[in-house]
Image (cartoon, rainbow, N blue to C red):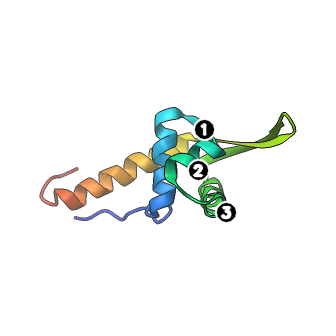
Amino acid sequence: MFKDLDPILHSQLRLAVVSLLIGVQEAEFTFIREKTGSTAGNLSVQINKLKDAGYVDVAKQFKDNYPLTTCRITTKGIDAFEQYVKALQSYMNPDSKI
């Protein structure tokens, strides 16, 4: 009846990152940090977990001699997010056949 929740997305910060990227497709690390209110260190760890799961792609480069990290949601990340939402819906509506 109840669907398993993706442990990668079940973390509040990782879910916030994926939710942001779903809306914008791609974002700079500083934008994500500001929107989530996270520390740089914690956000970096969580983004690496999302990257290792294949949910985001991370590009590192330099812009005006400053490091620039850009994150982009992957197709796998979009699919995982959609499945996560469906799984949550099964908890909210246990009698429906979602």
Q: Are marks 3 and 2 in contact (CB under 8 Å)?
A: no
Q: Which residue is mark 3?
A: 41
Occupied quadrant, residue 76: top right
Contact check, label 1 and label 2, Cβ < 8 Å? no
Alpha-carbon neighbours of circle 1 within 10 Å: few (<14), some, or many (≥20)?
Answer: some
Dot 2: within a 10 Å radius of its alpha carbon, few (fewer than 14), some, or many (20 or more) residues?
some
Q: Amino acid at mark 3?
A: Gly
Q: Can I make out residue 55 in this image? A: no
Identify residue type, mark 2: Arg
Q: Earlier in the sequence, mark 1 or mark 3?
A: 1
Against 64, residue 56 (above or below) is: below
* Residue 98 screen position, x and y as percent: 23, 50
Mark 1 and mark 2 lie on one chain; the one further toward the N terminus is 1
Q: At 16% across and 56% down in the image, what residue appears?
A: 93
Which mark is first along the chain, 2 or 3? Answer: 2
Q: Name the foreground residue: 34 vs 7.
A: 34
Percent position (x, y) of residue 47? 62, 55
Q: State whether residue 20 appears in this view.
A: yes
Q: Going by the image, does 75 lie left or right of 41?
A: left
Choose mark 1 or mark 3, whichever is in front.
3
Instruction: Find residue 14 and report its horizontal and vertical position in percent.
Output: 51, 57
Q: Compare residues 93 and 21 and report the one nearer the observer.
A: 21
Q: CA distance from mark 1 to mark 2?
A: 10 Å
Give the class, few, some or many, for how many residues have Cα within 10 Å of label 3's Cα (few <14, many ≥20): few
- Amino acid on which disc 1 is placed: Ala
Whole-Å distance between the Cαs marked 3 and 2?
10 Å
Residue 14 vs residue 40: left or right? left
Q: Which mark is residue 33?
A: 2
